[in-house]
Amino acid sequence: MSSSIIRSQEQHKVFVASSDDSKICVVMVGLPARGKSLIAGKAMRYLAWVGIPAKVFNVGTYRRSNTPQPQATFFDPHNEEGERMRRAAAEMAVTDMINWFHDDKSKGVVAILDATNSTKERRKWIYERCRDADIETLFVESICDDEELIMNNILEVKTDSPDYQGQDPELAALDFRKRILNYEKAYETIDDNEKHYTYVKLINVGSTVIINQIKDYLSSRLVYYIQNLHIKPRSIWLSRHGESEYNLTGKIGGDSNISERGEAYARALPDLLRKSGIPPNTKIVIWTSTLRRTIQTARHLKAETGFEKLEWKALDELDSGVCDGLTYEQIAEKYPDDFKARDDDKYNYRYRGGESYRDVVIRLEPIIMELERSENVIIVTHQAVLRCIYAYFMNVPQEKSPWMEVPLHTLIKLTPRAYGTQETRFKADIPAVSTWRGKGTSAKHQEFPADKEEKTH
Ligand code: SIN
């Protein structure tokens, strides 16, 4: 085993150990259409991305197992049968969650209970169930009276929610509004009588944040993440730099210029972005690394749109240390043990004098925080960095993310929604080499044909 690997594993231990041993149940609180599921999904992806086992338990999913498409009256607090069924769904979710925490296989550290949990009685019951099972609770209440945001969430529910699948969208929106009114009848915000709980209140998408009684490191880290979130609709666009001179010769790293075809991609990028669909009057901020190839790729985009541009050192390519400037064939020849060690565990392998994917994820954490605070952003960066950012948004497991194919001259549009991130890819009609290397090969960079095909996953 090479020394680089040993170093990586030591660092891995430190990183995971810093999440301490406490088990935490994040209890979402709030009326429907307040972005709870969006926040729950994001928190789960963030935790998985930094290596903390996390899972969302959605009470609506449990309720659907016996009441798949209830009408608004089901949620009326005076509907006894509805109350009984909803309580049963919460019971099932909490029991499964506690079992998950105690299951040796899942090694659960953070569970997110995604439900309205809108009464004091319900919160007390969850708190006591968790306390009796040695699980800390962190209540996260999302309060929102911004009509436009609520409306946006309602629109999303009527098209995406399994509760309304196959139904007339207008009737669905109407019913969902009635459901919200029913919840309002019984809703109790977290107040001073619940001061003994650890909680965060997010008022109008984080414009005011109230934090109470944070006790441990993991909770404070989570709260820091959650307080940076907003639930406004927006998209993130990701692009690698245009083909570079190093790409043409199969070398990794360096700070080369873009090739002629890379320049053609840079010229095509503003149009590609427009074609990807930008709502009217939308401002997009352009982020690049500090390396020439990304700055050159974003040059025409900046000039044509006048959008603000920021350069981030943290977006620079994974540092390949002593292998910088070599081809994969040369690395396999000069450092065969390292080459194999990287294939065996690409996520944790750290180049001699350089970085691992895990290192890149750590240095990207402030970028993710800033991204969560921001609205529309286009990021022009590098293969490894893009893989890490993509993995965060699309919940790609650590062992898979370093092997993902992210072709050159392709714009990826990601739109976070309550029920998952929507992805669309737009390929420019400009050929480029393929820089993707399969496990166990030292394949030279190869041509891949340009096509205009648009893929949605
Ligand atoms: C649901 O049944 O959709 C959710 C139940 C709740 O969170 O109140």
Image (cartoon, rainbow, N blue to C red):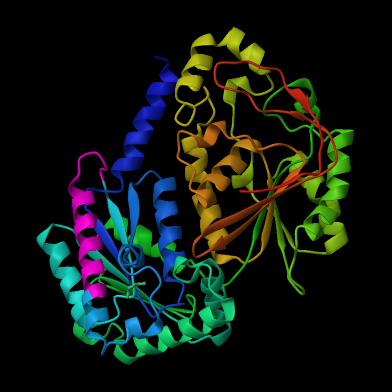
Report the magenta stretch's main SS. Answer: helix
Up the image or down, 226 lies above or below 109; here it is below
Across and down, in percent, residue 440 comes to 55, 16
Ligand 1, by image quadrant, is: bottom left
Furthest residue in direction top, as rendered: 333
Question: Would residue 337 be seen by someone viewing this image from the given angle?
Answer: yes
Extent of the magenta region: 85-107
Question: Residue sitting at 49 percent across and 11 percent down?
Answer: 337
Query: Would you say 186 lies left or right of 274 here?
Result: left
Furthest residue in direction left, as rendered: 132
Quadrant housing residue 43: bottom left
Question: Would residue 215 be seen by someone viewing this image from the given angle?
Answer: no
Query: Would you say 385 lies left or right of 430 here?
Result: left
Q: Depth check: give the residue in front, 429 or 177.
A: 177
Across and down, in percent, residue 334 comes to 59, 9
Across and down, in percent, residue 319 comes to 59, 32
Which quarter shows the N terminus? top left
Residue 18 included in the magenta stretch of the image? no
Quadrant housing residue 139: bottom left
Q: Depth check: give the residue in front, 145 or 312.
A: 145
Quadrant housing residue 330: top right
Up the image or down, 166 lies above or below 147; here it is above
Across and down, in percent, residue 323 comes to 61, 20
Question: Residue sitting at 18 percent across and 80 percent down?
Answer: 121
Question: Residue sitting at 55 percent across and 66 percent down?
Answer: 373
